[in-house]
Every structure is written in C-alpha cells, then in structure tokens.
Image (cartoon, coloured by chain):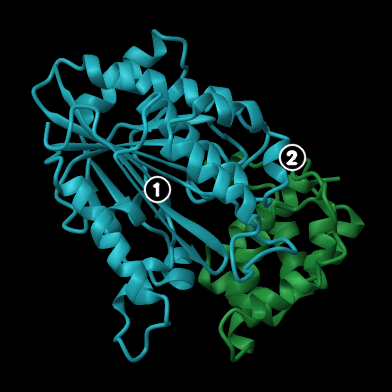
Chain colours: A cyan, B green
Amino acid sequence: MAKLVAILATTHHPFFYKTSQLRPDEAPPFAAEWIRKVEAYRATLTAARPDVLVMVGSDHFHQLWLDNMPQFLVGKAPHYDGNYYNEEREFGLPRLVLQGHEELSAYILREALDREFDLAFSNELRVDHSITCPIITVRPQNDLPIVPIYTNIFAPPLPRPERFVKLGRTVRELVDAWPSDLRVAVVGTGHLSLELGGPRQFGPHGPDPEFDAKAVEWIANGDIDGCLSEVTLDSLHAPGNATHGFMDFMLMMGLAGYHKADYADNLDLFHTMEAYFTWYPNGVGG
Amino acid sequence: MSKYLVNKFLFTVDRDPELVERYRADPAGTVAWWEAERANQILNCVAEESSTWLAFTDAERAALAAQDHVALFEMGAHPFLTLTLWIAMFERDHSEPLAMQLDYAAKLKHFALPYPDIGT
C-alpha cells in the first residue's frame, strides 16, 4: 500500500513570493522572519521524502464560475498550468507548470464516488495561488506530480464544516488504501480569520486574533470535536468575511485525525495570521 | 435583482487587461457596452448559444457606472471580485502601500454584521 508520509496544513499568502524576492534593503521589516519560518516549514516536507503530493485548495473565481460551480473537484490531468493574469498583476506570482498524477486522481475519483462523495472532475485545470503558493513555499523545485482537490469556500451555498472534515477523513482512508508503493504527502491550504473587500480588511493583524488563537490550538491539538462544536457556516462570518477558507484547515484536520501536530508554527502578519502545521502519520521519515 | 450578473461583469472585466483599462477610463460606456454585448454570453458556449434574459437592474447599472463599491457591497456583489478589480484599477492612484485598500475599507465602515448576503 501507499504510505502517507506527511500531512501539511497551512495558509497561502499570495504576497510571500514577491516579499521573498526583494533585496534586503527593499524588504519590509517582517520579511526575514517570514522567510525563515517558511524555510523551516519546507524542511518538514523535505524530511518526509514524498513521491507525490495531493494538494487541497480553492479556486478564487478563476476557472470555476457561478454558471457551473462544483462543491468539491478533483483534477485529473497530466499537467496543470498555474496562476492567472490577475495573480501576476496583483501579487507578482510567476506562471508555472505542474505535473499531474493521473493514476492517483482516477483512484480518488472512483473510490470517493463509491463512498458517497460525488466529486466533480476536471481534465484541464489551471490551478491558482491556493495550489501554487504552497508549491512556492514548501516545494519550490516543483518536481513532484500532484493531484489537486478544490473545495468551494467562496460561493454560497457552501458545504458545511462537517462535510469538509468528512472529506478529509475519506481522502485519508483512500490514500492509506491506495495500492501503490509511492510515498504520498497531502498539502492543504486555507485561511484563519480573513476579511477581503469588507470594512475590516488589511488591518495590522488578522481581523479576529481571538479566533486565530483558538484555531491554532484546535489544529495543533487535533481537536476536531472542539473545533466542530464552535464552528458553523454562520459562525464563520463573525471572524471575517473570507474566513470560510478555514474549512480547508478543517478538511486537513479530518485527514490528520485526533492527533497533535508534529510541527506547529505561526506568524502574526498585517492582514492575516500565517500558520504552519505538519503531521507525520508514520513518524518522521517513516 | 441580478447579483449573478453584477458578479459576472466584475469577473469578466477583471480577467481581461484591456477591459480593466476600458472600465477605468470609461465606466458608464463600458457598462453599457458590456450589458449589450456580453451580459448574455455563456462563458463556455459559442455566441449563437447565448442566454436571452440577463439584464442589470437600474440600481446595479448605476452602481457599476459610478464605480460605487459601497453600493455594490450593499447589494451583495461578491466582495472578493469587487476588491480585486478595484485594486487593479485604483491602487496605482495611491502612493503608500495598502492606502487604497484601507481607504476602500474605511468607506465601508458603517456596515456591521451580518453583512449583506452574497449568495446568488
């Protein structure tokens, strides 16, 4: 069977790439610590020696649109182009091409359908910064094939938090049972409290530091039940109008199960709290 | 109310560099042209298979023509779409980093939770 060697759950801050490219004399005061934390986090994936990455993210109205909006979608393609014009324009993100792993995509689609997850699929998917940012931060050599899994955290009506946790559990079962010798890592990105296009956007911290502190504890402690007892579709409006992206963290908690993270770090930035978690289901390098 | 169509306007303009500049330079003209020529085009279909029924309300047309992001927020236009396009059009008019985004937020400060519904 395949071996699930690492589970990474993190934020995807689109300005990291641009910040990391600045000369020290141009860089903002928080840049050095941010880069140091990202490099330390990258080492947690490197240590797991993965062969293939399952990547959980969310399209930000790039390819997926309101005329045909899937709740959960799996890419099944040999390649994925990455990043869009408006991401180059606003964030300075580079275009890149990722390899796909069609066999694992096909397996996840088939098996999830048979476990009552009617996943949509795409044979031609241009991934956006929810997938490319973690490539840039934790696998910048971009040398591994991926399976992208997109979730709808953006266009109501959304699936409920419980459904994200359940999809995480299902993906975990599928990866654990995949008849393959490969080493699989799952890398998912979401948000803590976040406001975009509203009155609380771009403050000196995330819009709700209290929510962020609780969220970090839930994730670091594998406290799925505590998280589910407080988080609902309605409650997620309060910490910030884009906080439904936290449900991608909840998907990753479902994947990791009731386990403390083996690595947990965060960084309070303007506008948002960055967070970095890794679990090693089979031990480091296992 | 046609929140979907307002979002479709923001979505299709934002992703096209020429339309971003056109909307910045000629807001009302671009909205009128877009509603006549593009509003009914299904994005994944050829022109002959366009829809027949989509139109802005007067209030939506006016808000887009006035580039009034406060009115768009009030109507439940998707805030991510509005913000992204506004950054593309107006960030260049501000010299300090994030000044445009903070001004944008300040103009919305009278909104309390729950914010207007963005469901379509």
Res A64 label: none
Residue reaching furthest to the top:
A114
Viewport quadrant of the C terminus of chain A: top left
Depth check: give the residue in front, A115 or A260: A260
Q: How many numbered marks appear?
A: 2
Res A10 label: 1
From the viewer's perspective, is residue A27 above or below residue A184? below
Task: Say which residue label 2 marks.
Answer: B119
How far separated are the C-alphas under marks 2 and 1? 27 Å
Question: Could you tell whether B79 is left or right of A267 in the image?
Answer: right
Residue reaching furthest to the right:
B58
Q: How many residues crowd mark 2 within 10 Å: few (<14), some (14–19), many (20+)?
A: some
Depth check: give the residue in front, B107 or A63: B107
Disc 1 marks a residue whose amino acid type is Thr
- Residue A64 in the image: x percent, y percent? 51, 42
Depth check: give the residue in front, A157 or A23: A23
Residue drawn at (60%, 80%), measured in percent from left and top? Answer: B91
Quadrant for residue A65, please give it. top right
Disc 2 marks a residue whose amino acid type is Gly
**Circle 2 chain:** B
Question: Could you tell whether B14 is left or right of A107 in the image?
Answer: right
- Provide the secondary structure element on which disc 1 rests: strand
From the viewer's perspective, is residue A66 above or below residue A175? below
Viewport quadrant of the N terminus of chain A: top left
Quadrant for residue B61, please give it. bottom right
**Circle 1 chain:** A
Question: Could you tell whether A5 is left or right of A152 in the image?
Answer: left
State which mark lies toward you, 2 or 1: 1
Can residue B38 be seen?
no
Q: How many residues crowd mark 1 within 10 Å: few (<14), some (14–19), many (20+)?
A: many
